[in-house]
Amino acid sequence: MKIKVIGSGCPTCKNLFELTKKAVSQLGIDSTVEYSTDVSEIIEMGVMQSPVLAIDGKPAMLGSGNLEKVKETLKKFVK
């Protein structure tokens, strides 16, 4: 599973990246979390909101959230 947080580099985006890393660790998911400030990636996904939590190249969660919301999102994709 490829997990990536994409945003503009704002504090909200960085916070989602940190929350995602923590959630991956707590859930025991064997994957690294990437961070990108390439907004064109968001546009290519057809999304007009940031940050984006993308899993396997597809948007899974838009905007900010808390640790529990990120964990619930990730659980939907764990195989």
Image (cartoon, rainbow, N blue to C red):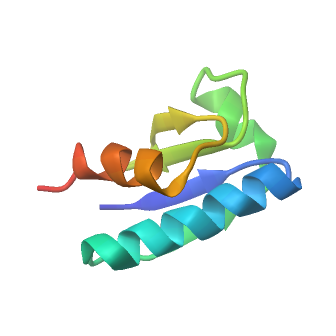
Where is residue 55? Give x, y as percent: 40, 49
Q: Quadrant of the C terminus?
A: bottom left
Where is residue 51? Give x, y as percent: 69, 42
Residue shown at the point (23%, 43%) measured from the top left = 76
Residue 8 appearing in the image: yes
Where is residue 63? Give x, y as percent: 66, 35
Say which quarter of the image contains residue 52.
Answer: top right
Considering depth in this image, is 45 or 53 the residue closer to the camera? 53
Where is residue 34? Give x, y as percent: 57, 68
Q: How many marks?
A: 0
Would residue 78 appear left or right of 62 to someone viewing this image? left
Q: Quadrant of the N terminus?
A: bottom left
Q: Does 41 appear above or below 21?
A: above
Residue shown at the point (38%, 70%) measured from the top left = 24
Say which quarter of the image contains residue 71.
Answer: bottom left
Q: Does 27 appear above or below 70?
A: below
Residue 31 appearing in the image: no
Would residue 61 appear left or right of 37 to someone viewing this image? left
Residue shown at the point (57%, 64%) measured from the top left = 19
Would residue 67 appear left or right of 48 to someone viewing this image? left
